[in-house]
Amino acid sequence: MTLPGLVAPLISGVTYRRGVHLLLGAVIALPYVLLAVAFRRMIAEDPANRSLFVVTAVVAAAVAAVPAFLGSTRALEIAAARSLLGVGLPDTVPGKRLPAETRIRGALWFGLHLAAGAVIAVLLLTALPVVVLVLGRLLGLRPGDLPIPAPVTVLEAVAWVLVALGVLAGTVYVVAAFGALAALMAPVLLGPSATEREHALEVRARQLAERNRLARELHDSIGHALTLATLQAGAAGQVFDTDPAFARRALTVIEETSRAAMDDLDHVLGVLRDARDHDGTPRPRRTLVHLGQLCQDAEAAGVPVDLTVAGPLAAVPATMSREGFRIVQEALTNVARHAGRAPATVRVAVAGDELTIEVLNPMPEPPPVQRRGGHGLGGMRERVDLLRGRLTFGHHAGRWRVTARLPLRDPGDGR
């Protein structure tokens, strides 16, 4: 082993943090030690009542062992191991009953923690007085005060200094070794149970689903607004000198579209923060009843839209209505992006137990490409799949057609 490797445990903060963890075990072990000493003394001083004292000691030991099997004790040990040992351990699942195997592992860790802490405490209580005695002798205290001979020569003084340093270094090495062993054993004895692993997977799945939903929201709302704003800005730039009135209208549309995009962005950020308005109600989100405004925005951007609605849109469940609006919005964004100012036809029908959305437009080759990351047609497919619907797209009678069929039931959100 190299010199830096030998010195590393002496100067590493990890060693001393782990030492604190071990000393916590010593502090917890102290009441147990005092209890054992008290019973041993009572048994030794009163042999006539030895049997009674033994039975009492067994009962007391059983009661004292209960904390080792508690879930709250295990949770505290996990928190201490994460912060002081630097071990990555998952959170415990609140309200879940721990299996016996997990409780036994936790109790074994608790006992080892207390035993290791007691060993380190005894070592420190032995080593530190030795160092103090050596330093006291080097400072010239009278021989009668200390049970070690005073150094006569410089060589003897240096030898005693080396002894003191050796005792200190040896103590630190032992602490480092015990701490490293504890860090290795913690995942084994405090590791997650099957229930906790399942809970961790569920939490991770929810986080990934929320991230995907956020990505779809950002793309569908902000992407739509940016596409319309880009088209309007380009058109205004071309006719700025020849048709100032059109340019002013285009700037107005850009302003309104950008403001709507900011509202959508506020909502998406609210998804992350679980944001609420001041009155405690969720922020409003656009649904199928707002299709008229969406089509007007598209027409203002130069994409003529023929909207046909059959059936009561207000009767569509909230989740279906919101996602249906996003599907139409994304389809019109694709029209503006890939087909320019080609006219689009939007048909929305509510019939029986199904919502049908159809968007058609003249589409030259090549057709829209599914891009990675949940955008475009891929994002629409994700939305439809989550709602257990069907999405089809492709050429139909010389036009590009996107059709989504959604079952009229609400899988999650209330209205």
Image: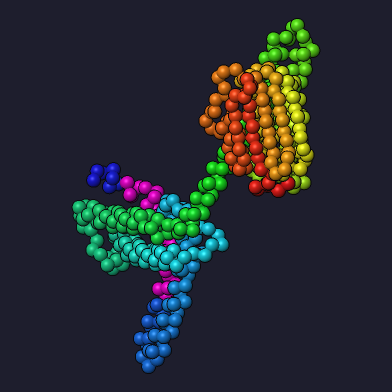
Quadrant of residue 50 within the rendered picture: bottom left
Residue that appears at 27% across and 67% down: 147
**Image coords of residue 250 (percent x, y):** 74, 17
Q: Is residue 259 visible?
A: no
Residue 46 inside the magenta-drawn segment:
no
| Depicted 236 relative to depicted 17: above or below | above
Quadrant (top left, top right, bottom left, bottom right) of the N terminus = top left
The range drawn in magenta is 8-35
Quadrant of residue 404 within the rendered picture: top right
Q: Provide the major secondary structure of the magenta segment.
A: helix
| Depicted 389 relative to depicted 295: above or below | below
For residue 78, side relative to residue 350 (left or right): left
Q: Nearer the viewer, residue 377 or 30?
A: 377
Residue that appears at 69% across and 23% down: 344
Quadrant of residue 385 within the rendered picture: top right
Residue positioned most to the front:
397
For residue 275, side relative to residue 127 (left or right): right
Q: Nearer the viewer, residue 194 or 12?
A: 194
**Image coords of residue 10 (percent x, y):** 33, 49
**Image coords of residue 11 (percent x, y):** 35, 47
For residue 355, side relative to residue 131 (left or right): right
